[in-house]
Amino acid sequence: MICVSIGRSRHRHMMAEHRHLVEQGAKLVELRLDYIRGNVNLKRLLTDRPCPVIVTFRREEDGGRFAGTEQERQVLLRLAIAEGADYVDIEEDIAGLIPRFGKTKRVISLHDFRKTPDDLGAVYARLRGLDPDVIKICTMANRPQDNLRMLQTVRNADVPTVGVCMGDIGVPSRILAGKYGAPFTYATFHHERTLAPGQLSFEQMTNIYRYEKIGPATEVYGVIADPIGHSLSPLIHNAAFDHCGMDKVYLPFRIPREDLAAFLDEADQWDLRGLSVTIPHKEGVLPKLTKADEAVQGIGACNTIVFEGPNRIGHNTDYRAAMTSLEEAMGGSEDGKENPIAGKTALVLGAGGVGKALVYGLKRREAKVIVSDGRNDVARQLATRLGCHAIEWNKRQTVSADILVNGTPVGMHPNVDETPFPKLNLRPTMVVFDAVYNPESTLLIKDARSRNCRVVTGLDMFVRQACLQFELFTGQEGPSELMRDVIRRTISAAKP
């Protein structure tokens, strides 16, 4: 179950959102009384309520907005119990001062906005001794492992326990709470009005992650990156799982570089079956792989990991997706026997994970490859390793290329007014391929079209590589049209 937190300054707005949420399927709502301006009318909020509620009156020190006296706050909490609220949230330090009465259930809570305590077991034991019906532990995640410790605390609890980690690192704990036995998790009414760091909206929890369908047997997949907020992979993979009726969920994992090795070592504790890998981890995961396909070995970068027992098997679907997209645009045959890339001069911008895959693919298709990167030494190293040429970044426009490929993040949302290549140096005979997929029509793509170049957008490559990942994860062909439709609708909806 999802408990949706409502924080509005007016009673009528809070009541309207409560009714709207129930119409959308919400079964439990938290009324954040500390957000209301002026006097709180509990009877108005609780009479004829459309679904059960948790009444919360949070102090500023616990992440709330109530700035009055503690005595005033406790009077309101007692009044909520007297008025028959379904649940009342009571912090650990005042649990002994708010007596049990009637049918109202006690949520005994602890909030730590700085860290996740080392000994969560001791925290749980303290709260358990305060006569709770539900225990709530909400802490800040500073490392991915904090999520695991929290979820394991929930799993081992003998009193119903809601344990979630805050912040973007803590998002997985919110989505997987039910899998580990939590009676409910928390979400917000709208993603632009979060009441706690890292909180997802009811719509996101319901429509993207299908929270109510996640159970103990649900297999876990995800994408690892840092930062993670820009990734659209959870949208398309979860939509594909749902379309195919699979008991699987795909999560966003923000993994700082220093935590990567430990996270991969603990994959079995997450019940992880597969991962997409993106910036900055495509090279960093290599030492942790037990096996790697030929493309990963040749490219020196991995964008997909499949877990099979103790084995972590690395793949690179970027390379295959990019080459298929490019060949199709250049008129290659469906059986792959014709090679329209052979003998062409290709300028690849970017020597990171995507750039490496592009250079590798173009070399295998017998193109004359020149690579350029803002870090000139990195471009030279890649050129030496894969047997191509490098050119300094400030001289990239001097190359007379048949194929121009952008493997950098330049032009990616929100920096949509940037381009990695001057418009005046684009020629009509060029094929221009931009691996950036958000937006689909980057400034580079727009400039190329205005110069009558053939273009390949990053969305096509993104969907193809995701379909290949889906097949590696599930053994089934990915629903490409569904994925393409989801990504296009999402990008279009995000436009100002």
Image (tube, rainbow, N blue to C red):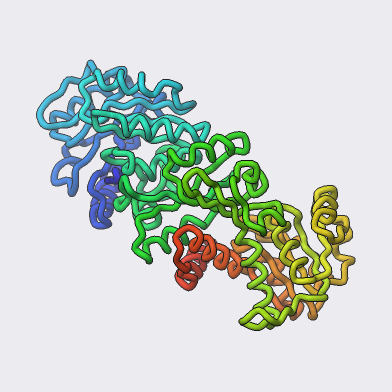
Q: Nearer the viewer, residue 61 or 296?
A: 296
Give the farthest residue toward the left: 102
Q: How many marks?
A: 0
Q: Nearer the viewer, residue 477 or 38?
A: 477
Residue drawn where x is 18% and y is 31% of the image: 105
Residue 297 is at least partly visible in this image: yes
Residue drawn where x is 24% and y is 19% of the image: 130
* 42 sits left or right of 124 in the view: left
Q: Is residue 374 above or below residue 174?
A: below
Q: Position of residue 344 (x, y in %)?
A: 81, 75
Residue drawn where x is 75% and y is 62% of the image: 359
Q: Nearer the viewer, residue 468 or 291?
A: 291
Q: Position of residue 126 (x, y in %)?
A: 30, 18
Please identify the quadrant where the C terminus is shown.
Answer: bottom right
* 69 sits left or right of 336 in the view: left
Q: Position of residue 18 (x, y in %)?
A: 26, 48
Residue 495 is at least partly visible in this image: no
Q: Is residue 454 above or below residue 268?
A: below
Q: Position of residue 399 (x, y in %)?
A: 87, 67
* 111 sits left or right of 348 in the view: left
Based on the displayed image, in which of its 4 quarters is residue 333 positioned? bottom right
